[in-house]
Image (cartoon, rainbow, N blue to C red):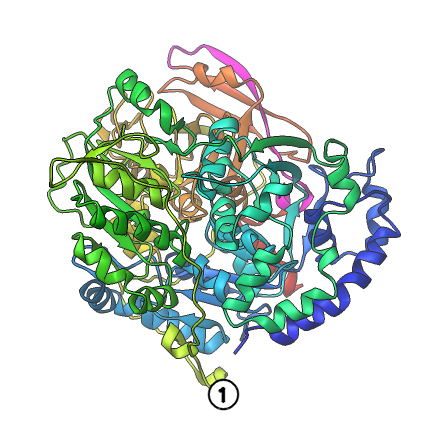
Amino acid sequence: MIFDLDKIRNFYTNFSYKIGKIRNVINHPMTYSEKILYSHLVDKIKELEPSFDKNNNLRNKYYMDLLPDRIVMQDATAQMTLLQFMQTKKCKTCIPTSIHCDHLISAQSGSDLDLKNAIEKNEEIYNFLKSASHKYRIDFWKPGSGIIHQIILENYAFPGGLIIGTDSHTPNAGGLGMLAIGVGGADAAEVMSGSLLELKFPKILGVNLIGKINGWTSPKDVILKLSGMIGVSGAKNHIIEYFGEGIHSISCVGKATICNMGAEIGATSSLFPYDDRMKDFLNKNGRNQVSVMIEKIKNFLKADPEVYQKPYHYYDKVIKIDLNILEPHINGPFTPDKATPISKMKEEATKNNWKTKIEVGLVGSCTNSSYEDFSKAISIIQQAKKKKLKIHSEYMVSPGSNKIYSLMKKKGFLSLFEEIGAKIFSNACGPCIGQWVRKGNKKNVKNTIIHTFNRNFSSRNDGNPNTHAFIASPEIVTALAFSGNLTFDPRKDMLKNEMNEYVKFEEPKSMETPTMNFNLEELGYESFSKKENRKKLSVIIKKNSKRLQVLSPFFPWNGNDFINVRLLIKIKGKCTTDHISMAGPWLKYRGHLEMISKNLLMGAVNAFNQEKNKIKNIITGSYGTVYEISKFYHSKNILTLIVGEENYGEGSSREHAAMEPRFLGVCVVLVKSFSRIHENNLKKQGILALTFFNPDDYYKIQEEDIFHFYIKKICPNKNIKIELIHKNGYKETIIAHHSYNEKQIQWFKAGSSLNFIKNQKSK
């Protein structure tokens, strides 16, 4: 079975016609991203003309109303998305949707036992997700079926399409030429209920790949290098579009790896044009009917020739990366943009006093869990076996999908992994998302791990703030696990084997993905009868559940200025969604707003005492956790705000990071800058998201300040005046900027975007 076959056929039949109509209005050659965006635009293309600037450009100014082809959700974010969707009273989703159970499986003992334990422990959640899928006609992929992004790549993604997902790494599908965008659960719930996706037209960053991937360098090194070049917010409000001769030396799954980690530099999405490597992937995954359709229109599934001839004219910025000279990189610790070429690692480790002994090497996650990725790791293991080398670090493997697991088993990969003592975890996110029960993990002990994941924030993988996590490709992680040392360079360094001989690794080889036929049930897909009367079906939520809680709407804004607002916390330094709403053991409460709100800002550093989760109650003078103090203020009807620094909310799409402060009475978040998804999530949930007009005003904020926000006449493009009253009575005024458009202001007034939609439908 090929999912959405009729929809895809209809899409390709009309695609060239749509592009022709667009050309009648847009008088310039188009990038590939523009073709996809315009072809999914609901407004009549003629109506865009008044919005064009003098350069015939809509980027970074025009809000588009888009109709995606599909919505995808993983089990952790699907809970809150469905709870919001249920408020719309719809009887089915208006857009094809799927749920993938990959986040709630802890990695501890090994694949079979971990999966069994997860099904028992999360039975209530799986029953809820399954019953909702059944009722609303959503595709349901069972626990153990695999990681959402790998399954999307294998089964759903198609070149030229538009997909949104409640996971920040949804852009993984860009490896198959699909524009894929990570969104919050409110966005998804709205589109599921029939609303359109609102997206500010992103700028487009062109990355010109010249040369050819070779030697020890892998696709992962392209994005590790780019991360180091532009930083964690360098691609904010941009789509990254790759082009150049170098793209043809990168496989479809390699392209997906690059697109996946675009989230780490703030990109709205990342995208490769269609080529033969994508065609090969479609065919090997039993989707040759799709590749046959594409043949007639494949020249439309890339930028126009003029764009490639003069990229600086048509992209907002162009970066060139020479694959011929690109060397393997190791990024980290604590941030994915600290990029170190492997030749410089010894120098950097000494300079930064990093512990160079590698305790654990981990291969897998949505970023690098394809058959090709594991084949490169196997290439190293086969060499090590031949050269009589022993592994010096723990080694752990997380396959990307049931299909990959089955292929690895058939080809003998699993037995080779087990021979070196590797632990094979479930086809799930596991350690990447903090679902790792790490034995002997002492939180006060500094240690080093290296993995193929996409994120390495403090405490993310094992809950230990002293774990220095580094990111690299599967072949580098595996080679370094045999050395046991972070400074080992397998291109030139030698290792002593069991015979006391010095031996050297050769360049790793990837193996061609074999073709095997699977039925959907084998892969973990659960089908439901289409004839059943779904109106009679119920969504299963236990009474007095500690895991699921039916949502109550947030209160609307009363139209007054926010007066006498108290500071909840002023955060120092990096504050990701992991800091705001931790994952790991807290994932079990993702469907219960009251319970998960207890983790609010546990990982954030208080700027006034340099401590985590310890803030001052200005009324009582005592100290407590962020949750305790915010609950106290809320019980006294005292409005609060959060103050932060750059790229606040970096990381995951988890909207819990916006819903928790809203639930606990936070009315404003004021920061130097936001990450894209988190800013939108705050807007969706009715919190006023503001940025300092002068970033240095951050330093004026004192612990016991009182704030007045003059917002009665809030409107687009108009700054907001804030009066600070310090403890000594001294007053000063600062200015804040906001990015709300007319519709988003209506969300704020209604109390949330869902409230606004319900109000509109009731009129």
> What is the count of numbered marks?
1
Residue 729 figure quarter: top left
Q: Position of residue 80 (x, y in %)?
A: 42, 58
Taking the image as drawn, is residue 654 in sight? yes
Q: Residue at x 48, y 47 (%)?
A: 260
Q: Position of residue 736 (x, y in %)?
A: 57, 25
Asked if 137 appears above or below 78 in the picture, the reply is below
Task: Name which residue type carries label 1.
Answer: Asn
Secondary structure under tag 1 reads: loop
Q: Residue at x 75, y 69 (%)?
A: 13
**Residue 59: quadrant of the picture:** top right
Task: Return the residue found at the far bottom.
Answer: 531
Residue 738 shown in magenta:
yes
From this view, report whether residue 651 is shown above or below residue 125: above
Name the residue nearer the viewer: 298 or 711: 298
On the rendered structure, is 252 left or right of 23?
Answer: left
Nearer the observer, 573 or 540:
573
Residue sitting at x 16%, y 53%: 421
Q: Is residue 351 above or below residue 606?
A: above
Name the residue carrying label 1.
533
Q: Which residues are magenta?
A: 727-745
Using the image, determine if residue 720 lies above or below residue 301: above
Whole-percent x, y for residue 710 in the image: 58, 28
Q: Is residue 572 visible?
A: no
Q: Nearer the viewer, residue 410 or 9?
A: 410
Left or right of 678? Residue 430 is left
Q: Position of residue 759 (x, y in %)?
A: 61, 59
Which residue is nearer to you in this view: 121 or 630?
121
